[in-house]
Image: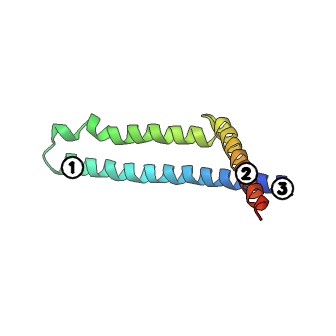
């Protein structure tokens, strides 16, 4: 049963991570649509300004897109999830061992 609980916890965490990525992607799309529309309105309704065109408009989608790409690689296993899983397992084992030792030390003083 303990093995089942561990698998269930891992599956729940995985679903939470995937859901977080999809939420991130939706916010990315919505915000960048807003930025594109705002940029279009400013460029075409008012006097065009060189500072508003080109590179300055693209920095947010490009920078954020790189972050979204890294997030996607991490969530879908192409960027180090095995490392993360093994680190989490080691950390959980370490903390469980410390808890057990603390409990045994406390029990000894009773």
Which numbered disc covers residue 2? 3
Q: Determine which quarter of the picture holds residue 16.
A: bottom right
**Disc 3 to disc 2, C-alpha distance:** 14 Å
Identify the residue at image location x=77%, y=65%: 110
Which residue is under mark 2? 96
**Percent coordinates x, y for residue 93 in the rendering:** 73, 46
Left or right of 104 in this view: 81 = left
x then y, percent, for residue 26:
49, 53
Residue drawn where x is 70% and y is 48% of the image: 92
User: Which residue is nearer to you in this view: 85 or 103?
Assistant: 103
Considering only order in the chain, which callout, 2 or 3, is on the residue closer to the N terminus? 3
Q: Please state, as top left, top right, bottom left or bottom right, where the N terminus lies in the image.
A: bottom right
Percent of width and height locating residue 73: 58, 37
Q: Residue at x 74, y 48 (%)?
A: 97
The residue sitting at 52% across, 37% down in the picture is 70
Density class for disc 2 (Cα within 10 Å; few <14, some 14-19, many ≥20) is few
Please name the residue that numbered disc 1 is placed on. Answer: 42
Mark closer to the chain start, 3 or 1: 3
Query: Does dot 3 land on a helix, a strand or a loop?
Result: helix
User: On screen, 17 above or below 108?
Assistant: above
């Amino acid at each position: 049963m303990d093995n089942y609980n561990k698998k269930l916890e891992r599956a729940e965490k995985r679903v939470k991570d995937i859901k977080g990525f999809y939420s991130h992607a939706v916010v990315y799309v919505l915000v960048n649509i807003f930025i594109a529309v705002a940029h279009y309105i400013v460029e075409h309704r008012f006097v065009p300004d060189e500072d508003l065109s080109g590179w300055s408009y693209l920095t947010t989608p490009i920078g954020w897109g790189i972050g979204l790409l890294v997030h996607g690689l991490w969530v879908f296993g192409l960027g180090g999830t095995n490392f993360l899983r093994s680190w989490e397992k080691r950390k959980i084992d370490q903390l469980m061992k410390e808890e057990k030792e603390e409990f045994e030390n406390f029990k000894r003083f009773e």
